[in-house]
Image (tube, rainbow, N blue to C red):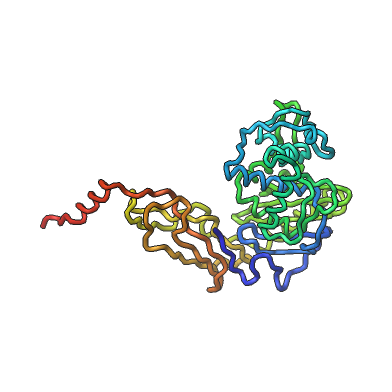
Amino acid sequence: MITILFPTQGFAAPEQQPLLETTAESAILIDAVTGKVLFEKAADVERPPASVTKVMTLLVALEQLAKGKISLSDKVVTSENASGMGGSQVYLEPNEELSMREMLISIAVGSANDACVAVAEHIAGSHEAYVKMMNDKAKELGLKHTHFANAYGLPAEGHYTSARDLAVMMREALKYPLFSKLTSIKRYDLRGGEFVLWNTNKLLWWYDGCDGGKTGWTSEAKYCLASTCKRNGLRLIAVVMATPEPRSHFRESMRLYNYGFARYEAANIAEQGKKLGKIRVSKGQWDWVDAVTASDVAIVVPKGEKKSVTYKLDLLPYVKAPVKKGQKVGQVTVMKDKEQVLKVNLVAARDVEKGGVFKHIVKLVRSTITPAE
């Protein structure tokens, strides 16, 4: 678990924001770890997102994977409804089977509308039911300017989102390593090489550190891109919507990234899963359990201000068995200029079951033995 303690609560606009020009009608640049806004322009205006919709399509699918409700090896059968989709597609035939993995790759790399519907029907039983799952997820994330009418992004009444909401979706999607793995694939040979998919996100080739995201275009939405980039430990998320001409969504995203990486740096304390202490376990099979970070412990700061960042650890004195992996055992508090800005949970690195009778007898004997003089 991660708690943001910035006075602006992470997603509020900076009080005095330096000027940055962009032809995008809406744009936002945030730090991926904390959500701190580094730049924004008309970030809450509701606009059609075109195929950037698929960030949420993928997010819902990845959540179902994490819950064990589907697997990457599932055989997904294409319905006539799915095969009849227009726009970007991989030309699925009725009753054609692809694995869930290849369907998700088709969405992430080829922006395939037909694969979106096939996945939706496999997971939820119908495309409409899956769209409801997407809208439910939007509500869960607190998105105030988002509503989906389909899972693929073609123009439809009541289908809209905002740059800020897309940044939240991207930040949530990045919690699943598979999202970056899928959306960073540059080329994929589908059907044994009969159909080659090239990633529509050209920043993967053109901008150092870019490793994921989703493009979109319709005449209504113009050119859109939600992407992520990491350099020197600093991961940023950029969203541009309604840029005017071909490739302008790449140009404007690079403009945002250049701005962010020139002005800010990451104060990295610990990566997710880093051991920062250990906790005594009472009546357990093991006497100790490692305390590891539940997520990255890092904040973004203006360049040259790393020295003002400090942190402290708060660990429980002990925990009683049984202990579950991921159970909270403490927290890390990060401070900048002595002001709290971030809290991240410390969690148990593994399960610890209750100790058996023999284990308790051994402990008792050891405690009563007095070393010889």
Residue 120 visible to the viewer: yes
Q: Nearer the viewer, residue 354 or 36?
A: 354
- The location of residue 101, given as percent across then percent down, is 65, 36
Count of numbered tags: 0
In which quadrant will I find the N terminus? bottom right
In which quadrant will I find the C terminus? bottom left
Q: Residue furthest left?
A: 373
Residue 156 to residue 331: above or below: above
Q: Taking 130 as reference, is 294 left or right?
A: left
- The location of residue 242, given as percent across then percent down, is 84, 55
Q: Taking 341 as reference, is 120 left or right?
A: right
Q: Nearer the viewer, residue 297 or 365?
A: 365
- The location of residue 316, given as percent across then percent down, is 40, 63
- The location of residue 57, given as percent across then percent down, is 71, 46
**Residue found 16% across the figure and 54% down from its top:** 369
**Residue found 72% across the figure and 41% down from its top:** 120
**Residue found 89% across the figure and 49% down from its top:** 219
Residue 31 to residue 184: above or below: below
Q: Nearer the viewer, residue 371 or 308?
A: 371
**Residue found 77% across the figure and 62% down from its top:** 43
Residue 204 sits in quarter: top right
Q: Nearer the viewer, residue 244 or 307?
A: 244
Residue 203 visible to the viewer: no
